Structure formats: C-alpha cells, structure tokens
Image (cartoon, helix red, strand yellow):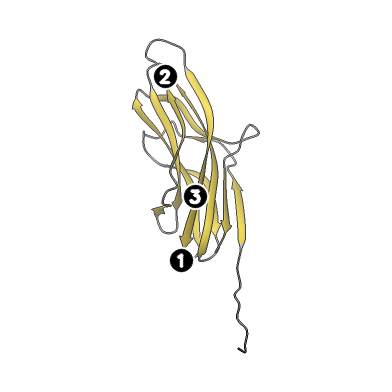
Amino acid sequence: MTGTAGSIAIRGSGFAVLQNPVDLQPSASGVWVDSGLFVDLPAAGVYELDAAVRASLTAGAGVNTWIRAHLFNVTAGVDVPDSETIVHQLITTAGTGPLAGGNDTAPILVPYTVPGPRRIRLEAARHNTVGASTAASLGTGPAGRTTLRWRRVG
C-alpha cells in the first residue's frame, strides 16, 4: 500500500468563572434566569461540558423550595439535553421556627455534539412548591465558585 493515511485531532478547552452572584429571588418561580456565565465552543465537534453550580436558599417555616440549573445553547435557542440538575433544596418543617438556609454546589457533566460554533450559557431557576423562598441566588467567591468548562473530545 502506498500513500499516507491519517487524521488531525483538533482538541481544545475553555473555562469561565461566574464573576458576581446572581439574585434569583426577583424572578417568578420556575423562570429560567441568564446567569451571565457562558463559554463559546469554537467549531463543530464533540465536547464535554461541565459546570460546578453553587447556590444558596433561605426560607421560613413550612416551605419546600429549590434551585435548579441547566445549560442552554444560545446559538441554537435550545436546552443542552440532560444538563438539568437540582443544585439546592430546602424543606423546612411547619411551625413558627426561625429562617433556615444553606448553600450547596452541584455538578453538571454532559457530552454535547454541535455542527458548528456555539455559545453555551448557564441558567438557573428557583422553584416554590409550598410557601416561598426569602432569598435565592447563585453564588461565587472564595467560599466556592460557579464555573463552566468545555473540552473538545472529538
């Protein structure tokens, strides 16, 4: 056999950090909020997308509230499949107890194939099924950052 066979594997990666906390409380329950955190995928290919999403919630007694996050393909106007996760949930007991709150960080890790360059952003929503949160936000800072990363794998 004569000639040359081969392929060029184009690889790369990118990383972004949420610069400021995002207040989710003013938005209605269940409404996705643009976090302002995004990455740009440079070309067609298969990517691993991952995020570390930090969130905090505060609520009074007798409440079931949570924050969820997902990745959104801004270029195509569609959700990134299988990227949704519950970041933090707060269920308080009924009664007249004090406010309860907490912080959690949840990961998102999904493979994603795109036909060309795409912008991917992180969105979050707070949800109330019983009562309502009194504070809900995405956090970032020295105690834990919200991040978004891509790595081209094919």
Q: Amino acid at mark 1?
A: Pro
Vertical placement of residue 22 versus 49, above or below: above
Question: Which SS class for mark 3?
Answer: strand
Residue 121 numbered tag: 3
Give neighbour class at mark 2: few <14, some 14-19, many 20+ (Cα, 10 Å): many
Task: Please state which of the two labelled residues, at mark 1 or mark 3, is closer to the viewer.
Answer: 1
Q: Residue 24 falls in which quadrant of the image? A: top left
Residue 134 locus on image (x, y percent): 44, 23
Dot 2 or dot 3, earlier in sequence = 2
Tag 1–tag 3 contact (CB < 8 Å): no
Element on which disc 1 rests: loop
Judge left or right: residue 143 versus residue 22. Answer: right
Decide if residue 22 is on the left or right side of residue 31: right
Q: Which mark is residue 115?
A: 1
The image position of residue 132, as x and y in percent, is 38, 24
Q: What is the distance, in whole Å, between disc 1 and disc 3 at their CAs?
A: 17 Å
Amino acid carrying label 3: it is: Arg
